[in-house]
Amino acid sequence: MTSGSYDFTGYEVLVVGGTRGEGHAIASSFARSGASVTVTGTMMLRELYDTDLSPFDYESVNLARQESIDHLVGAIDHLDVLVLAATCNLPYGLPPGEQAFVAEAARSGLLGPTFLTTRLRFKLSHSPALGGGCVVNTGAVRTWLELSSTPEAAQAEIVESTARAGDNWAGLGVRVNSVLQAPRSVFPRQYAPPSELIGGSRVAGGTLVRTQQQRASDSVADATLFLASSAASRITGQTLRIS
């Protein structure tokens, strides 16, 4: 199914990290399907981004700071869908001790995506959507776990924590699922190398051609919308893998 197959009219959706990449594709798909969408980024003003954020409300948040997360939570009145698509970008030159602190805090749920999700769980529990409020983790969450583990271990931990949260939060009326994209290190021959990309696309014979990266983002967006839809109202604790 594609994003046009869904109707999210009346839904309030928060896409954390929705200013670029997969997060922006997901936010755009929800907006096209009728949802009211808020995206977050780390910059103070939306005008500082080179992507079109006009269809969305915007909130600045730093997931490595509790006070910033608390401010975001206070700005959200009602929430039906929470999508976690913000990668971990620590300041360059951060002292090793402070980086270790952030890594441990993120892993224990005192900072980062897990802390934000926990802070928003009761607002999600009040969603009147069929199946209740919905949380969707994307591969961006893995970058927080990779602060203190290998990519493979981080991937496995997301799968395990998703299953655990699905069980633990079912009583609150909140579903928790994940969408993970298989890692790619090499572009197939029919696709342009990164140096030739223009806004995620390439020019071939005067025609703008969609690239593998765009298609992958669209697949992740479609899977996210499916998990948030009424068609998936009984699905929780599951991880969808996008190849």
Image: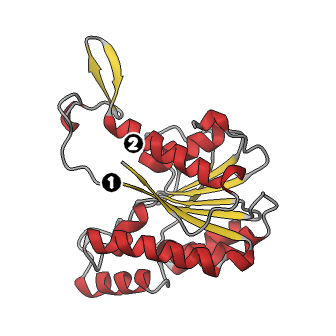
The residue carrying mark 1 is 182
**Place of residue 183 in the rendered image (x, y in percent of width and height, measured from the top left):** 28, 54
Residue 64 can be seen in this image: no
For marks 2 and 1, the one nearer the N-term is 1
Instruction: Say left or right for 204 vs 134.
Output: left
Asked if residue 101 is positioned above or below residue 50 in the image, the reply reads below
Amino acid of disc 1: Ala
Q: Which mark is residue 112?
A: none
Tell me if 2 is positioned left or right of 153 in this view: right
Element type at mark 2: helix
Q: Secondary structure at mark 1?
A: loop
**Residue 215 visible in the current orientation:** yes
Residue highlighted by disc 2: 216
| Label tally | 2
Amino acid at pointer 2? Ala
Furthest residue toward front: 234
**Where residue 163 sits: x, y (%)?**
52, 74
Residue ranking furthest to the right: 128
Q: Residue at x 33, y 14 (%)?
A: 207
Please tell me whether residue 63 is drawn above or below residue 43 in the rendered image: below
Residue 97, quarter of picture: bottom left
Q: How is the image coloured?
A: secondary structure
At 39% from the left and 42% from the top, the residue drawn is 216
Q: Mark 2 and mark 1 in contact? Answer it, CB < 8 Å.
A: no
Disc 2 from disc 1: Cα separation: 10 Å
Out of 69 and 188, give the one closest to the viewer.
188
